């Protein structure tokens, strides 16, 4: 989990409380029930993003808290995707830094800004990334993707999430992942023909189901990680 | 690169919103292979075009799948390792992709496309099972309705008890009977083995092992002469009935008068068929019965 964490599946006020803990280093303080509210009203350090700034950012993105949360997630995903495509080794950190800067500036621009608000993040991100490129680059440890050990929890969550699929969706995803490389192309063509859909449509369906599975598994893993 | 203009971003995106990016371009972007102005245009479009964002999210999953399933080309694989697993979310995607690949791998070709073949196999199995059931029921029906056919296939053997059934005299007369038993010892029964002629001698004491066998192929007359040996012969009338093993009476002869120690019957050959038969003698005066057994082949 990154500094910001992710909000999918979480109630918005809870997410705010979690963010408030992330903004200020309260690691030395004991936290208990209701501490989040205390933290939200605590005076943050000067360099840390203030809760009010973040609230203003969300309000600027959308007056509806739920939609604001969704837009926040979309913006963050786009920032990470772009930074990663640029070869940035710490895309999540730079994305969060970008969001923090925008949040601090919302107070100044919200009255006059016209247009798609998410585009503003792109400009700020360019600056953040430019600064990052100027820094002396330290060797970064990237988790090797070839690690063969898929955690057991992933399989448990996969099992649960696959069980939630409709039989039809399960059939599609099962077959989509079934055949080996050599047989896959022909197999998918045959599946598409049997379902009466085009090959690209089959792929799209399978990927949408796969995306749902991904979300479900992430929620499941996050739920399992929580005490 | 300065601070973004408050309206500049909007103006810029207007020029790229309609820009179309192919799936290949999206893939190149995710693998860090998109360069220069084309990459910048893609980045702007990604922020303004939610459709492109959706496609990119799906492509991100597809790329992770391809990597996990070993379906990336060599140059793609290097780009992937360098540029893709840089966020926790993507690393999770790769894990899930690998888990999915392992999870569904055993299913392989065997369930969907091959399902048609499997279905055909199943259909054949059902057809075969149905045929077996039909044959079974037909056999039962035939055995019930046409026992003659069954006997033709499986000749029925009479139980031992029937072969040793005593004559009416023995079974129904008391030991203290004062009636003479003159012929009890003096009537040696002719050998009750297979009789090739048109006459056959039956003894009430015939056992299952030596049931007389009558061969139809060797008969020359229209009647078969059957001699039933009696232990004693009161001069009263008898009725003879020829029964199949099923109990069906196929021939009856009334008012038979015994001669000496026997009763002779003339049974039409046409009434005989392969199988086991019983000749039941009934003494008309008191209803006492004796049975004789005969096998026809």
Image (cartoon, coloured by chain):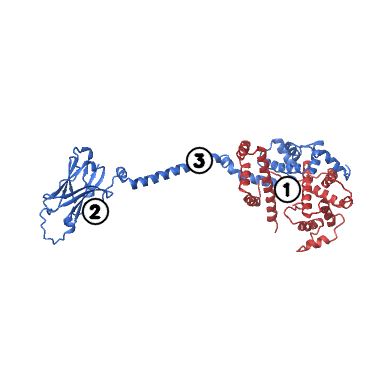
Chain colours: A red, B blue
Q: Count residues near mark 2 (Cα–Cα under 10 Å), then give few for <14, some for 14-19, many for 20+.
A: few
Report the number of numbered marks.
3
Q: Chain of mark 1?
A: B
Determine contact: label 2, label 3, CB under 8 Å.
no
Quarter of the C terminus of chain A within the rendering? bottom right
Q: Is residue A147 visible?
A: no
Q: Are marks 2 and 1 on the same chain?
A: yes
Tell me where residue B95 appears, x and y as whole percent. 68, 47
Q: Count residues near mark 1 (Cα–Cα under 10 Å), then give few for <14, some for 14-19, many for 20+.
A: some
Gap in angstroms between the C-alphas marked 2 and 1? 89 Å
Q: Count residues near mark 3 (Cα–Cα under 10 Å), then give few for <14, some for 14-19, many for 20+.
A: few
Q: Chain of mark 2?
A: B
Q: Give the mark, 1 or 3, whose residue is nearer the N terminus.
A: 1
Q: Which residue is mark 1?
A: B89
Q: Answer with the quarter of the image where residue A31 lies.
A: bottom right
Tell me where residue B51 appears, x and y as whole percent. 75, 42
Q: Chain of mark 3?
A: B
- Foreground mark, 1 or 3, reads 3
Gap in angstroms between the C-alphas marked 2 and 3? 53 Å
- Residue beneath the point at 65% across and 37% down: A199
Gap in angstroms between the C-alphas marked 1 and 3? 45 Å
- Residue beneath the point at 18% across and 40% down: B198
In terms of depth relative to the viewer, which is nearer, A153 or B206? B206
Q: Secondary structure at mark 1?
A: helix
Q: Does residue A47 lie above or below B201 as drawn?
A: below
Q: Which residue is mark 3?
A: B121
Q: Secondary structure at mark 3?
A: helix
* Apparent side of residue B206 relative to residue B116 in the rendered image (left or right): left
Mark seen at residue B161: 2
Q: Give the mark, 2 or 1, whose residue is nearer the N terminus.
A: 1
């Amino acid at each position: 989990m990154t500094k910001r964490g992710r909000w999918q599946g979480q109630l918005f006020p809870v997410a705010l409380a979690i963010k408030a803990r992330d903004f200020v280093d309260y690691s030395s303080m004991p936290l208990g029930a209701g501490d989040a509210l205390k933290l939200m009203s605590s005076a943050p350090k000067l360099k840390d993003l203030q809760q009010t700034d973040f609230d203003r950012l969300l309000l600027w993105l959308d007056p509806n808290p739920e939609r604001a949360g969704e837009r926040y997630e979309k913006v963050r995903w786009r920032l990470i995707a772009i930074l990663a495509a640029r070869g940035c080794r710490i895309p999540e950190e730079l994305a969060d830094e970008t969001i923090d800067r925008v949040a601090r500036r919302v107070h100044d621009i919200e009255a006059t800004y016209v247009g798609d608000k998410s585009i503003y993040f792109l400009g700020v991100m360019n600056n953040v990334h430019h600064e990052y490129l100027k820094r002396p680059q330290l060797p970064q440890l990237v988790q090797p993707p070839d690690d063969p050990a898929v955690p057991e929890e992933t399989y448990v969550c996969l099992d649960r999430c696959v069980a939630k699929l409709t039989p039809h969706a399960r059939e599609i995803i099962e077959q989509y992942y079934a055949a080996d490389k050599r047989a896959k192309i022909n197999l998918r063509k045959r599946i598409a023909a049997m379902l009466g859909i085009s090959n690209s449509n089959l792929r799209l369906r399978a990927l949408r189901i796969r995306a749902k599975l991904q979300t479900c598994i992430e929620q499941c893993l996050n739920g399992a990680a929580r005490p | 690169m300065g601070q973004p203009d408050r309206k500049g971003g909007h103006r810029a995106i207007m020029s790229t919103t309609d820009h179309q990016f192919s799936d290949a371009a999206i893939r190149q972007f995710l693998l860090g292979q998109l360069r220069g102005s084309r990459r910048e245009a893609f980045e702007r479009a990604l922020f303004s075009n939610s459709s492109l964002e959706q496609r990119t999210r799906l492509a991100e999953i597809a790329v992770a799948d391809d990597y996990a399933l070993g379906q990336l080309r060599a140059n793609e694989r290097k780009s992937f390792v360098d540029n893709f697993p840089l966020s926790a979310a993507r690393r999770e995607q790769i894990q899930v992709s690998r888990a999915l690949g392992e999870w569904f791998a055993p299913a392989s070709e065997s369930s969907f496309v091959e399902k048609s073949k499997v279905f055909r196999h199943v259909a054949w199995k059902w057809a075969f099972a149905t045929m077996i059931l039909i044959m079974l029921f037909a056999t039962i029906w035939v055995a019930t309705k046409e026992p003659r056919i069954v006997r033709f296939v499986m000749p029925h053997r009479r139980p031992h008890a029937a072969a040793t059934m005593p004559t009416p005299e023995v079974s129904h007369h008391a030991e203290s009977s004062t009636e003479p038993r003159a012929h009890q010892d003096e009537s040696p029964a002719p050998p009750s083995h297979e009789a090739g002629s048109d006459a056959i001698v039956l003894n009430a004491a015939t056992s299952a092992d030596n049931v007389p066998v009558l061969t139809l192929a060797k008969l020359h007359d229209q009647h078969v002469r059957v001699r039933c040996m009696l232990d004693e012969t009161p001069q009263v009338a008898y009725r003879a009935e020829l029964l199949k093993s099923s109990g069906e009476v196929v021939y009856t002869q009334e008012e038979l008068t015994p001669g000496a120690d026997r009763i002779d019957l003339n049974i039409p050959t046409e009434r005989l068929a392969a199988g086991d038969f019983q000749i039941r003698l009934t003494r008309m005066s008191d209803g006492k019965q004796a049975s004789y057994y005969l096998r026809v082949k």
